[in-house]
Image (spheres, coloured by chain):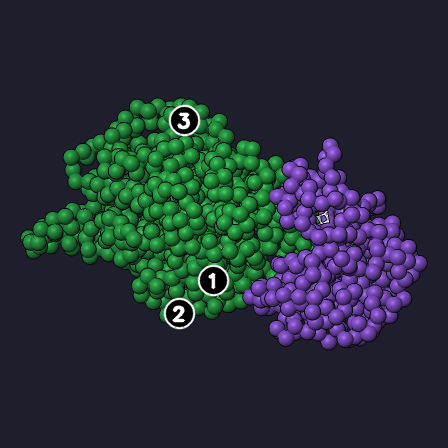
Chain colours: A green, B purple
Amino acid sequence: MDRIKLLRQRFISGKKPRIFVDRAKFYTEAMKATEGEPMILRQAKALKHVLENIPVVIFPEELIVGAMVKDPPGAIMYPEGVGLRVLPELDRIGERKNNPLEISAEDIEIIRNEIAPYWMDKSLGAVAEKIAPKFCLDLLYRGSFYVATEIAGISHFSVDYASLLRVGLEGIKEFARRKIEEFENLHLTEPEEIEKSLFYKAVEIVCDAVINFARRYAEKARELAEKESGRRREELLKIAEICEWVPAKPPRNFWEALQFVWFMQVALHMESYEQGISMGRVDQYLYPYYERDMKSGLLYFDEAVELVSCLWIKTNEIVPLFDELLTTYFAGMPTNQAVTLGGVNERGEDATNELTFVMLEATKRVALRQPNVHVRISEKSPKSLLEKCAELILSGVNAISLFNDSVIINGWLKLGVPLSDARNYTTVGCVELAPGGKSYDSTDAALFNIAICLELALFNGETRFGEKLGVECGEINSMEELFDCFERQVEKFVKCMILTCNSFEVANQIAKPTPLISVCNSQLEIGKDITLGSAKYNFSGVQMVGLADVADSLAAIDDIVFKKKLVSLQELIKAVRDNFEGYEELRQTLLNKAPKYGRDEIANRYAKIVAEIFAREVMKYRNPRNGWYLPGIYSMSTHVGFGMLTGALPSGRKAGEPLSNGIAPHPYTKSLTSAMHGVTSIDHTLFMNGVSYIITISPNLFRGEEGLEKLISLIEGYFALGGMNCHFNVVDVAKLIDAQKNPEKYRDLLVRVAGFSAYFVDLTKEVQDEIIAKMIEEA
Amino acid sequence: MKGIIFDIQHFCVHDGPGIRTVVFLKGCPLRCIWCCNPESQILAPELMFDAEKCIDCKKCAVCDAIKFESTISLNRDLCNACGVCDEVCPTNALRIVGKHVEAREVIEEVLKDFVFYKKSGGVTFSGGEPFMQPDFLTEMLRISKEEALDVAIETSGFASWEKIERAIRYIDHVLFDIKAVDGEKHVLLTGVRNDLILENLRRISKEREVVLRCVIVEGYNFESEEDALKLADISRSLGIERIDLLRYHRFGEKKYRMLGRNYELKVRDTGLIHRIRDVLKKEGLRVSVGGLI
Ligand code: SF4
Ligand code: SF4
């Protein structure tokens, strides 16, 4: 069988992912053994202990080696973060409805007896609880105001592989060694040097740890080669040679460069938790190796595709270990290892190259949900790039997102990022952004429910259950007063969210320095751990959720209450409090007669104002790494989680229904372009942490070559309007059938019906059936 | 200059090249028995009522035409489509379809999507039959061209040549509906003869590139592969290369109910559309099948 087919089999077989405790076990062992030593050394030693002991496995036909878990897909446990939240669920985690996981009875015992007790008072959460203001923590635990993620660790960054590949870990180790020797030889007398030398000692340890980890793979490969013959034996011997060389030394060829990257990815995932550890501009920093090999005839296009595919497949080895609650907020088991392709280079020239296309081809062949393939599109991108992307999108490869260079570069410049770093930006996680080079931007620090701020504004600072959590503003008699009150709630709760995030960051500084991330992305000469702010860029990203709900609600109040005077504000508030029980007629009026974001100018204007309020509040604050907070607009699946805990809204939405997803409007309009006008009435350059806009389409909207052209026009139009990012969700028959059962999940699913496009869920059952039948017939 | 339209749809991808905005003009001289847009036929605003949406709130009890007994009942003879009930109905169960608008207003709405027309898209005038409002149409066409829009028209071709002639210079693409190839059948199925239509098709195809569009209503307008050959003859004789076959569908059924009308057409489907496609392909034409999904 074809190698790629064979390798991807493991991930499409429907096998339940398993929880693996190896990392947690060795990490805990080491932490127990090093009690009393400086924390940064303990972390370094713990990583070393983990990498020395976790199982080394090479799967049949692999070319890129290094297993995240011994039998993928699986989940790694991070007991120092939120890994132990599953503790009470462990016995029945295989049966839970969403994302069930396997675990052996034996491993449950290990967790209960060896791991969990140690962390009870030492996890990041335990430390953070001693730091954060109680009010803010209480708000967090409610789950309805914000989710703050750094209690799990920081992660969420784009590894600076361009620099790493140049020197190799030995190069970094040498630098650290020199610094340590200078200190040991009494050349450094400033008091800061003591802590610095401690940092360099940790650097030395983790570099060695990763190098030795790779050598374990070299050994393993040789051992396996003994049992093989022919082609596979040659391959394994080659792998052994590669693992001997990288990541210790700079790679000598393309294969080595890819293997280098993957060893680092694995090691980073053993150090810090599995969210958003991204690979950056892969088609740029790997290109020199690719080009050299191609020129010297050592590599062919197909081989390159195969090698890249092998790397891509590896990113699917892990799923996150979330408890049931977190699964609601972050559904679909994302780990969000992003790769960035295309775009312009530091000089502003088109950076698309042959490797870009190799990687897109690999994406098409692999067609799994990871990695997140982010393609930067600039005005200088060749037509063929967008064509290839459109082709992939239409073939149903839903892991592709497109990013708009001109908007994003412009946004960085506004923040004072120098032009070359702005142009060299990378993507992180699902839609986030980071300036080029050494940056540590904690891009998913928190997600914020802006809709609940409106709820509290309507109830004079109280929740619908009568708790006084917000700001009291007295009776509201005009739009201005309502706005004023809403802003005051936003101000207060954003502040609480930031205090929470900052407390969590301090907890990380105390309890979870990350020397290996520091090796990758800090400015080494500063000699401090990256959690202390040693990167060149140190932003934190927090996202707004529920934009469309607030915009629609404000527009409805403006129109129905103040302009048309169909109902008084007091009456409307009462209806909202009662979840529209006995107010169906009013609710219908709000749904059908009021202006909506994505369709009507006035609601678009409200969306813009709301977005600007959020951005302004967020950008007031600094984090403990001395970086600024940046706003974003995306929700993962927190719009569902927040929605469950948010009461009815004047938009006509009932309590508990999901909020809007990312920056997208609710699907009231039947026109995608009109939605795009709404979305871009907001200035995306204000949201430099990233904006998510997901467009669900049926492939039959864009058939054949003409269809491809039309999709390109749509994307180009959206980008010309100032859209930052878009992601197409192409649905097939299976999804349509699912949409019939779960219409709420597919509210924006577009299908073509008789010369026009309709939302699938708006159609009657009969029509839906007919469409499905015809689609099957066509196929 | 005002005219009456019943919809403007943005982001249409099957009505001419590129991404288009379709303007639907109200009023049609034909009465195709399979028509799936009954609200497009009459050249005046009409009231539509969607019983499924009604929540029986009685807010619309503002007019003699609307009575409530056990449930709502409409006396359409008393309705002059004034729109008052539409305005108060919270669920949009009652809706006026069709409104009088200025030509320029329409084009301004179309121009909102200008950024999406860059490569090849533009505006498509459809209906109803756009030539039923020739002055209004020509005015919109003129403004469209002033604004550098790419213009397509979808027509049944049933209009005096004089009306078509003064519009044609503003039109880039013609989507020409063929309802039936046989003259007698045409009368039976649409209420009008097709001589004028075919004559107009001949004249238009000399001036503009034409795409033919045929809804295949099996057993009615098309009965066998023979009909396909006739269609191929027409196309070839006029130098037309492209035919879009559209599947018949019943999505219009509910709309008849909403207009207080009946719809009784029963159509069987043995896959004639695919056989026709194959015949046309063999005859060297560029054929696509679409229209449903
Ligand atoms: S449109 Fe006017 S006349 Fe017709 S039913 Fe409604 S209110 Fe009465
Ligand atoms: S106003 Fe609308 S929803 Fe209410 S009874 Fe009349 S038609 Fe039904």
Cα–Cα span, label 1 and label 2: 19 Å
Q: Which residue is mark 2?
A: A348
Which is more toward the observer, A762 or A7?
A762
Q: Secondary structure at mark 2?
A: loop
Which is more toward the observer, A119 or A42?
A119
Chain-order first, disc 1 or disc 2: 2
Of badges 1 and 2, the one in the foreground is: 1
Q: Chain of mark 2?
A: A
| Labels 1 & 3 near each other (Cβ < 8 A) | no
Q: Is residue A290 in view from this perspective?
A: no
Q: Secondary structure at mark 1?
A: loop
Image: B79 above or below A296: above
Q: Quadrant of the N terminus of chain B?
A: bottom right
Q: Amino acid at mark 2?
A: Gly
Q: Amino acid at mark 1?
A: Gly
Within the image, what quadrant is residue A127 found in? top left
Q: Chain of mark 3?
A: A
| Labels 2 & 3 near each other (Cβ < 8 A) | no
User: Where residue A622 sits in the image (x, y, percent)?
Assistant: 27, 51
User: Where residue A24 sits in the image (x, y, percent)?
Assistant: 32, 34
Q: Amino acid at mark 3?
A: Glu
User: Where residue A774 sits in the image (x, y, percent)?
Assistant: 72, 46
User: Is disc 1 in the same subunit as disc 2?
Assistant: yes
